[in-house]
Image (spheres, rainbow, N blue to C red):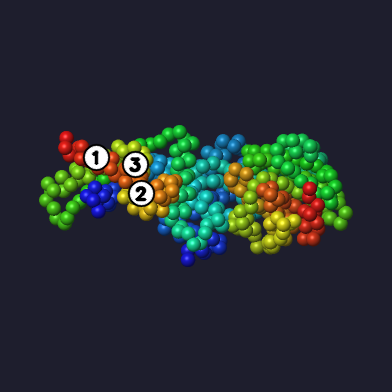
Amino acid sequence: MLIARAVRGDSAAYEEIVQRYQQVAFRTAYVITGSAPDAEDAAQEGFVKAYRALDRFRLDADLRPWLLRIVANEARNRVRSSGRRHQLELRLAEGFRPGDAAPSPEAVAVAGDERRRLLTMVNALSEEDRLVIASRYFLELNGEETAAALGIPEGTVKSRLSRALARLRARVEETANA
Amino acid sequence: MPELEDDLTALAMQLEWPPTPRLRAFPIYVEVSPEAVRRAFPRWALAAAAALLIVAGLLAYTPSRDAIALWINLHTNIQRLQHPPTPSPLPSGQLGENLNLGTRVTLEEARGSTGWKITVPSSLGQPDAVYVKSPPAGPSKGEVSLVYGQRSNIPVSGQTGVAVLVTEARGKVDEIYFHKMLGSDSTVEQVSVGGHPGYWISGHPHDFAFADANGNFYSDTLRLATNTLIYDNNGTIVRIEGDLTKAQALQIAASMS
């Protein structure tokens, strides 16, 4: 197992772990900091700290939430210590083709507009709501990983997500009725 | 799954994320001539130079055990500039003054300035010289060095005039880094010093890294580059360097109080 080799001091194994998890770590830090340079710093520092803490890693635990917790803590510390928080503004990729295969140009435009509106509403949520929604749906983290990323108990994730979805749903309906 | 959650899941596939940078697994060691550094740069200039080195792509240097001068903690700051010892061929002046141990003080002054308990080996008697190195040159809670000259049955280093050097700092040994920094000319054996975990390093170790009281890594030079006993005395890392046998080193450690 890769992590077992890393814990035994196999540096090549740890390098492989970094390569494997760097994307989700960076994106998690990005969701928290709202800044790509800050996210890079946080993820990088997180991996170095994780390496130093390998001797404390329990081999029966899951590696991904453990790493994400360290990286997310680092990201939050950076936001706190810098005193600045960038507004997270996720965007839709250019040229995407939502919906089924070969839709009409009009259908593509309508679907695209709807998703842009939805994304705008997510971006406009409170930080707490945005973070939990982004963690579960955009980063596709499971409950344990979301708890690690947000620094909250796993039992709190479900209720927080439920409240965040309810608020988002209310905004969607409000816009649709307007 | 309700429609909103379906929409969010679909949205995830269309998101534009910033490109993921290539992250490194380990801190970078950069080799710099210590003399040139000492001559040319104040600390702030060093930080700028280190950043330029990174930008220039000088990445992933293999740590060189006996020439590491800078420890750069990725993207954050320079943890410490090392000045490896430059012992004069013939010792002159105060004992240990060429070893870059910090400011010479009395033992009482050292005790007053550090705020943590400094232990002294009774088997060696009173130290001949005491030095304190405070942050930022030293680790976060400072570092105290007790220097001993001629002692019975212990050879004196011809270059330094020092028989035994005892160094104490608050921190924690990091086994992975500790082992990585030892070269093939050193062997490590785990020992117990009065119930405290320790390591007997025989050979010619040059460098030692540990996490200081604030969790920052501090890379230090083993000044005498000879047999060294290192142990953790309730959060104080004690290093005993000298041309000692293992039994002598353990005896000195056992007399620390």
Q: On what subunit does the disc labeled 3 rest?
A: A
Classify mark 3: residues with Cα within 10 Å, few (<14), some (14-19) or many (20+): many
Q: Which residue position holds label 1?
A: A170
Q: Residue pushed farthest bottom?
A: A1
> The C terminus of chain A is located in which quarter?
top left
Residue B79 appears at what percent x and percent y? 58, 43
Q: Is residue B122 left or right of residue A87?
A: right
- Amino acid type shown at disc 3: Asp
* Residue visible at 20% across and 37% down in the picture: A174
| Residue located beneath label 2 in the image | A158
Same chain assignment for discs 1 and 3: yes
Front one among B12 and B94: B12
**Depth-wise, is mark 3 or mark 2 nearer the camera?**
2
Residue drawn at (17%, 55%), measured in percent from left and top?
Answer: A100
In the rendered structure, which disc, 3 or 2, sits on the residue that comes first in sequence?
A: 3
- Nearer to the camera, A175 or A33: A175
Can the viewer see residue B201? no
Same chain? Circles 2 and 1: yes
User: Which-is-in-front pick, marks 1 and 3?
Assistant: 1
Residue B200, image x, y percentages: 72, 59
Q: Is residue B215 left or right of residue B164?
A: left
Residue at mark 2 to residue at mark 1: CA–CA distance:
18 Å
**Mark on residue A129?**
3
- Return the disc, 1 or 3, that comes first in the chain's sequence: 3
